[in-house]
Image: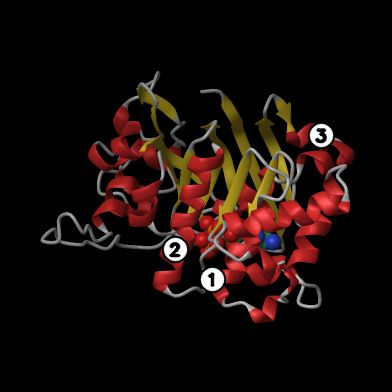
Amino acid sequence: MSTVLSIENLSTFFKTDKGIVRAVEDVTFSLEEGEMLGLIGESGCGKTTVAQSILRLIEYPGKVVSGKVILNGKDLLKATDDELYSLRWKEISVIPQSAMNALNPVYTVGDQIIEAILLHEKVSKSEAVKRTKTLLELVGIDGERQKSFPHEFSGGMKQRVAIAMALACNPKLVISDESTTGLDVLTQAQVIALIKNLQKKMNLSVILISHDLPMVTAICEKIAIMYAGKLVEWATTEEILNNPKHPYSKALLNATPNLSDPDREVVSIPGSVPNLVNIPKCCRFHTRCPYAFDRCLNESPELREVTPGHYTACFLEGDKNG
Ligand SMILES: Nc1ncnc2c1ncn2[C@@H]1O[C@H](COP(=O)(O)OP(=O)(O)OP(=O)(O)O)[C@@H](O)[C@H]1O
């Protein structure tokens, strides 16, 4: 397997009236070809900011202040606008949170997919029409429905169209940012199963952004856990489930019902995520961590590999100084 995406020490801050919001700081992880990685964490911990930084979609007052985003050997943060234009859709694409953001209500769904193909690839209109039919069928929609308008589809079908659109130019990497929000539970499960199915079928690399730990553990090969703008743990799903290292990961697992162990008590995490404005150098989880000691209040633990392929940022796991 080869590495498709490598994010190295990524930091993205927002300048606000109250001070600097260190929304994403020093985040490092990578993604292999054909791998699905779940990026999880509580609301406000920086998942969307990571996705937008990868895609270079951070707008003022936000700024990517440091780091690298290497996609197939090319640093996206240094790419020119033309280079980015040619990479988006063809190399990397997004399934948005709401299909309504991706679909224009005044055009047929077919015309919108066809337009995306023609804008990014040198193919004939008839080729694009043919591909659109195939794409719709790939996501379980009758190809003839390309003549329908978005309002003629249910929420789940619109989300399937958004997935077809994200796949229009055969990208290698797809970022799904909470793309089942607002759908009923059954439709959510169907859309997630579809993304998993397509990942296998097309050997896609997928970053699946979600709050839903049970869903992520069920379908992702790897998991990266964020807390208050920092990556606290990154490992295979098996390792995260059986051998979590970071106190936040352990707390998150304990706070989540487990269907295979229904008798286990679900324990909520006391306290709340700290305010990220002008946050001092420290372990950001220390205010909620039952194991915090002096060092956690004054230093920020670095992410380090504690066993092969298992990374965590916690002083309890020791470090080169500890
Ligand atoms: N435009 C902005 N201006 C100021 N702060 C911002 C801005 N956008 C995001 N933030 C802050 O950055 C932090 C990370 O937000 P982000 O949306 O990335 O988190 P998230 O984990 O994706 O949350 P959710 O799960 O709710 O979507 C939050 O503290 C948020 O308030």
Asked if marks 2 and 1 touch (Cβ < 8 Å), the reply is yes
Q: In this view, does 80 lie to the left or right of 221?
A: right
> Residue 142 location, x and y as percent?
61, 66
Foreground pick, 127 / 64: 127
Q: Residue furthest bottom?
A: 151
Tell me the distance, in whole angstroms, between the alpha carbons under discs 2 and 1.
8 Å
Which numbered marker is on residue 120? none
Mark 2: which amino acid? Gln
Numbered badge on residue 190: 2
> In the structure shown, which secondary structural element does the residue marked by tag 3 occupy?
loop
Pointer 1 with pointer 3, Cβ within 8 A: no
- Provide residue 171's location: percent of width, then percent of height: 67, 41
Classify residue 2 by image quadrant.
Answer: top right
In this view, the residue farthest toward the top is 320
Of discs 3 and 2, which sits in the foreground? 2
Mark 3–mark 2 distance (CA, rounded to whole Å): 36 Å
Quadrant, the C terminus:
top left
Q: Which residue is drawn at 66% across and 53% down?
A: 134
**Residue pointed to by mark 1:** 156
The three-letter amino acid code for the residue at tag 3 is: Ala
Mark 3 and mark 2 residues within 8 Å of each other at the beta carbon: no
Q: In this view, does 91 lie above or below 198?
A: above
From the viewer's perspective, is 147 left or right of 281?
right
Judging depth in this view, the residue of 246 and 48 nearest the camera is 48
Q: Badge 2: how crowded within 10 Å, few (<14), some, or many (20+)?
A: some
Q: In this view, does 243 lie to the left or right of 185?
A: left
Q: Which mark is residue 79?
A: 3
Q: Where is residue 42 in the image (x, y as percent from the top left)?
A: 44, 58
Q: Which is nearer the N-term, disc 2 or disc 1?
A: 1
Q: Is residue 280 visible?
A: no
Q: Is the residue marked by circle 3 packed among few (<14), some (14-19), or many (20+) residues within 10 Å?
A: few
